[in-house]
Amino acid sequence: MTNSPTTLLIVDDDPSVRLTLSHVLTEIGYCVRSADDGFSALREIRNEAPALLLSDLNMPNMSGFELLSVVRKRFPAIRTIAMSGSFSGDEVPSGVAADGFYQKGCSIAALLRIINSLPNTERQVARPSSPESPQWIHRDALDSSPEGYVTITCSECLRSFPVALGADRLKQQTDCIFCGSSIYYAVVCPADQMPLEGFQLETAASRLFPPSVSNLTY
């Protein structure tokens, strides 16, 4: 199996598909793992990134459409193949972020041809948030309630969810409610700047137009 990836992750919600593909590809020589949806696939990838990802498109929780988009952004070194029985041919369906496409029901030989024909592309990795570089979240200036919420987008699974504001606005940490990854963020509230900006504007105006001439008509 020259010039073929040695590690492969199969993602499909159908246990029989996972079992069949895992058995055949393991017999050929691949080191195979499997996952039943996009979220479990992301956990597997975080533990150890495979060289190749083979993902079904229609799955519950997180579909293959979403998973492949996340992998393209977060783990661009992984070569990806979408698979589905809803599309025919060997062209990647429009809007799917994959390097190749495998039509379910076709032979294993067809799948191996697709694997061996995948392009060797180099893509830059998008870095997740960290304590040193948190996400900066802008809060509505009109919302001054201490029990307010902000919306955070997970850099791992790209899903958004609300988080209650804490007392400290800098370098807060939360876990994604979908995939469980850690997210660091800081809240920027425009309302915090308004008093200072207003004072500066008022001071500047008083210098240009002192009280003695404030009632003059021009």
Image (cartoon, rainbow, N blue to C red):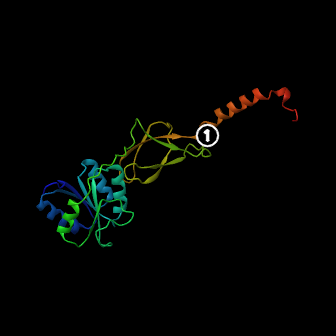
Q: Position of residue 6 (x, y in %)?
A: 17, 53
Q: The residue tagged with tag 1: helix, strand or loop?
A: helix
Residue at image x 14%, y 60%? 26
Residue 46: where, in percent of width, then height?
28, 48
Q: Camera-side residue: 139 or 104?
A: 104
The percent position of residue 24, horizontal first and vertical second, equals: 14, 65
Which residue lies at the image location 40% right of the left edge and 48% below the top edge?
A: 155
118 left or right of 210 in image:
left
Q: Which residue is mark 1?
A: 191
Residue 91: name its quadrant.
bottom left
Q: Is residue 106 left or right of residue 128?
A: left
Q: Nearer the viewer, residue 8 or 99?
A: 99
| In this rendering, position of residue 121 left or right of residue 214 | left
Residue at 38% of width from left, 39% of height from top? Answer: 130
Residue 82 versus residue 105 in the image, above or below:
above
| Quadrant placement of the C terminus | top right
Q: Residues within 10 Å of mark 1 (few under 14, many from 20)?
A: some
Q: Amino acid at mark 1?
A: Ala
Residue at figure coordinates x 33%, y 49% from the top left: 123
Could you tell me if residue 63 is visible in this image? no
Q: Quadrant of the N terminus?
A: bottom left
Residue 214 vertical position relative to residue 73 in the rendered view, above or below? above
Is residue 2 depicted above or below 190 in this figure? below
| Number of marks present in the image shown | 1
In this view, the residue farthest toward the right is 217
Q: Is residue 205 among what the camera can see? A: yes
Q: Please tell me which residue lies in front, 163 or 201.
A: 201
Q: Quadrant of residue 30?
A: bottom left
